[in-house]
Amino acid sequence: MILILSVYNDAITNKVCEWLVSFNTEFLRLNFQDNCQIEGIDISIQGSHCSFAIDGKVYNSADFTAVWYRTGELFSNISHDLLTYTNHRHLVEMHIKELKVVHDFFLFSMTRVFNIGDYFKNNINKLTVLDKATECGLLIPETLVTSQKRILTDFLTIHSKIIVKPLFASNVIYAGEVEYSTYTRFMSLVDLDELDDYFYPTFVQRYIEPFFELRVFVYNRTYFSMAIFKDDQVQTGNMADIRVQKAESSRYVPFKLPDNVLISLNKLILSLEINSCSFDLMVTKEHEYYFLEVNPAGQFDFLNKYCNYYIDNLLAQSLQCEKKKCS
């Protein structure tokens, strides 16, 4: 059987599941919002096994021949139950830490079969990735993390145009009924004037003027690339993030990466020890390729939509083939 680890309403997961249904392939989709309970973990010299229950039905780790980790964390409902069970903060923290040990071993036990994606690689340190990218021969924008206004002012003076972005994966923050998203935006002298002399460590980069941007999905050394040409007439205020621009105002075309960039990206994939991911790159009018970041979960819905790559079909076929090998 195939195990898919995801979240509710994830469009990419839905499409892969639809293909598996059309192939008449048996699979279990486990969403992190599901009421999943650990039945037992057995560890001995003969090996280890995990069993868990969903809606009263028990599954064993040995039941699965292939696993696709898409996104999410399991047993989050138990963490929420702990918070409602007691208001003793240290007791809650202790239980959540112990629960994480169980959670992580459960996911580790699933890495012994064929895998697409990896929970343990899902939140790779952005700064580590940038450092490794330079070692692999990729260009990156000049980068600074600082908590001092003086240093940030010097950086802006040198580069004249800079952007600020989150150090961690982009998040959505809810305050009552108001929703805030952490997009990449420009930072100006006006912004600097409003800062104290010392502040929370902030991640900034020199702004690279793009000729076009690239979104690249990689699976098993196969590259699916798309160039995005933005409409310069569309105003996005102080935002430097293409996601704030309406999709219809940009042009999307399939793209073939040059060999030297492919070689460097392959080196980076090996260095990060991942088998699927998405890359964001930017290309200047001088045909310089700048690496921006990697998403180990891998986003490819837009690539499917605009370039007809059918990546969801490829992933479904890979999972199905691995299941057949073990049948």
Image (cartoon, rainbow, N blue to C red):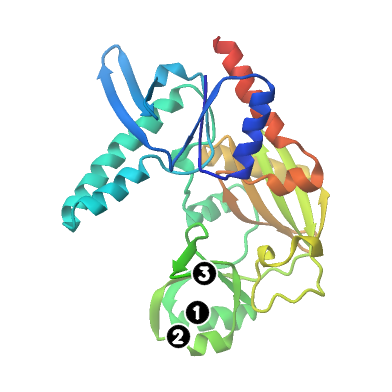
Find the distance from the CA under tag 2 to the CA under tag 1. Answer: 10 Å
Residue ID for mark 3: 180
Q: Identify which amino acid the numbered label 3 is placed on.
A: Tyr
* Mark 2 in CB contact with mark 3 (< 8 angstroms): no
- Looking at the picture, does residue 96 appear above or below residue 41? below
Mark 3–mark 1 distance (CA, rounded to whole Å): 25 Å
| Disc 3 to disc 1: CB gap under 8 Å | no
**Does any portion of residue 220 appear in the rendered image?**
no
Residue 109 horizontal/vertical position (percent): 39, 26
Can see residue 6? yes
Q: Which amino acid type is shown beneath numbered disc 1?
A: Leu
- Which mark is first along the chain, 1 or 2? 1
Foreground pick, 248 / 274: 248
Of residues 257 and 84, the one nearer the viewer is 84
Amino acid type assigned to the residue bearing label 2 in the image: Leu
**Residue hosting label 1:** 152
Foreground mark, 3 or 1, reads: 3
Position of residue 93 relative to residue 103, above or below, is below
Q: Residue at x 51, y 85 (%)?
A: 192
Q: Which corner quadrant of the image does residue 217 belong to?
A: top right
Question: How far separated are the C-alphas under marks 2 and 3?
Answer: 20 Å
Which x, y percent locates residue 36? Answer: 37, 34
Foreground tag (2 vs 1): 2
Q: How many marks?
A: 3
Question: What residue is drawn where x is 75% and y is 43%?
Answer: 304
Q: Residues within 10 Å of mark 2 (few under 14, many from 20)?
A: few
- Front residue of 229 and 312: 312
The residue tagged with tag 2: helix, strand or loop?
loop
Left or right: 38 in relation to 289: left
Compared across the picture, whether 301 is left or right of 39 comes to right
**N-terminal label among 3 and 1:** 1
**Label 2 sits on residue:** 195
